[in-house]
Amino acid sequence: TRRSSDLSAYGIGPKEYLLNFRMSIAVSLLKNSNTAIKVVGISVGYENQLHFSKAFKKMHGVSPAKWRQKYLSEQQAPT
């Protein structure tokens, strides 16, 4: 499809684009809300929390819970 070929010009396929899009929304939800990890996963299209956590960890190197904990501690640290 045209859309797929448009994405390939950027060096990513539709699957990778969707994953990046989902994870950017997940990061925003983790930063800006106290939403439960399971609900964040569901909000970005994962019915299974384990699958969401694995995909998030593969992309960010830590679980969503650890990522949020680290982000919040950095925000509270004195500058």
Image: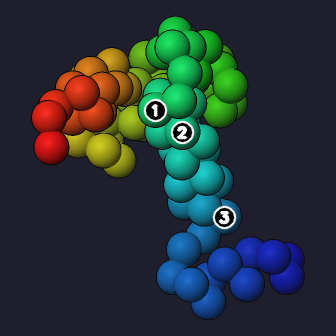
The percent coordinates of residue 17 (x first, y second) are 60, 62
Q: Name the residue beneath numbered marker 2.
A: 28
Residue kind at label 2, given as amino acid type: Ser
The percent coordinates of residue 20 (x first, y second) are 53, 55
In the figure, 16 relative to 38: above or below? below
Residue kind at label 3, given as amino acid type: Pro
Q: Name the residue beneath numbered marker 1.
A: 31
In terms of depth relative to the viewer, which is nearer, 21 or 73? 73
| CB under 8 Å between discs 1 and 2 | yes
Q: Name the residue beneath numbered marker 3.
A: 14
Q: Residues within 10 Å of mark 1 (few under 14, many from 20)?
A: some
| CB under 8 Å between discs 3 and 2 | no
The percent coordinates of residue 75 (x first, y second) are 28, 34
Res 53 → quadrant: top left
Camera sees residue 19: no
In the figure, 6 relative to 32: above or below? below
Res 77 → quadrant: top left
Q: For this view, does 49 lie left or right of residue 77?
A: right
Q: Tag 2 or tag 3, which sits nearer the N-term?
A: 3
In the figure, 1 relative to 63: above or below? below
Q: Residues within 10 Å of mark 2 (few under 14, many from 20)?
A: few
Give the residue furthest to the left.
78
Q: Secondary structure at mark 1?
A: helix
Q: Residue at x 65, y 20 (%)?
A: 42
Q: Residue at x 42, y 36 (%)?
A: 55
- How many numbered marks appear? 3
Q: Residue at x 56, y 14 (%)?
A: 35
Q: Tag 3 or tag 1, which sits nearer the N-term?
A: 3
